Amino acid sequence: MFRQDGRSPDDLRPVEIVHDFLAHAEGSVLIKQGNTWVLCAVSVEDDVPPFLKDSGQGWVTAEYSMLPRSTHVRTARESRRGKVKGRTHEIQRLIGRSLRAVTDLNLLGPRTFIVDCDVIQADGGTRCASITGAFLALRDAVRKLLAQGRIGQNPIKDSLGAVSVGLVGGLALLDLDYQEDSCAEVDANFVLTGSGKIVEIQVTGEAGPFDWERFESLARMARKGVSEIIRISS
């Protein structure tokens, strides 16, 4: 079976990564995964949240947003609403957790790495593309600080990637676009390390419960997809 865009069920969308996309950020990456485009930029501040004061430990956090015309119809800026939506809050916490999972915070020194992930164009899989792009931007920022002598050791412990998988019409598909995602019976996001370890799995039976065999087939597909993404981005 071939999908609307001509891909086989276990094919990724084309992945393009542009490093140093912004002139002023310590690290920045534009990641394109099919028609989903996300700009990820790292800012480094010589300060930490109050709960880490005097600990000598650093922090990595993330913010996520979708530009108003990243979608088919204009999405109002959340700043105009005066609050962050639950979905946005969930995604940016996921990105931050994922980055911290592969970072030795004790080697950062008392500073905070803030990764802004802005979706320029959305066609499904925005949180997964954001995680992959955020990691690459963070890695670039760390390399810059190492070269400047601002940190003494590389705090990045492993590589990181994320991909969506799902069941659509009973068929397992890798890297769902929006049309596929919107009608999936099962929708899952896998965040994995380059060494094959699990950081986080989010999976929902949109059409009802599903069996372990289905889950295991999705997990195998996700491992293949993340391995390929990490290979492309290395």
Image (cartoon, helix red, strand yellow):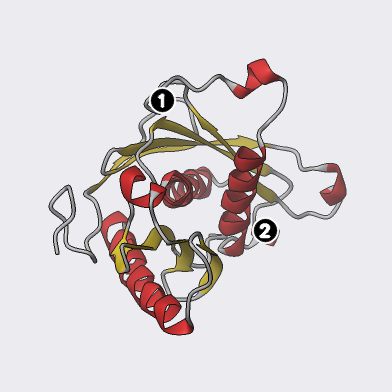
| Amino acid beneath label 2 | Leu
The reply to whether residue 19 is visible in this rendering is: no
Identify the disc placed on residue 150: none
Tell me: 172 left or right of 5. Answer: right
The residue lying furthest to the bottom in this view is 213
Q: State which tag comes first along the sequence, 2 or 1.
A: 1
Q: Residue at x 53, y 45 (%)?
A: 145
**Disc 1 marks which residue?**
23
Q: Residue at x 38, y 62 (%)?
A: 165
**Disc 2 marks which residue?**
105
| Amino acid beneath label 1 | Ala
Q: Residue at x 44, y 33 (%)?
A: 119
Give the secondary structure at mark 2: helix
Tell me: 55 left or right of 188. Answer: right
Q: Badge 1: few (under 14), some or many (20 or more) residues near its Cα, within 10 Å?
A: few
Q: Quadrant of residue 113?
A: top right
Tell me: 114 left or right of 9. Answer: right
Seen from the viewer's position, the closer of residues 196 and 177 is 177
Q: Position of residue 139 (x, y in %)?
A: 46, 51
Q: Position of residue 39 (x, y in %)?
A: 42, 34
The reply to whether residue 124 is visible in this rendering is: yes
- Dividing the image into 4 quarters, which one contains the C terminus? bottom left
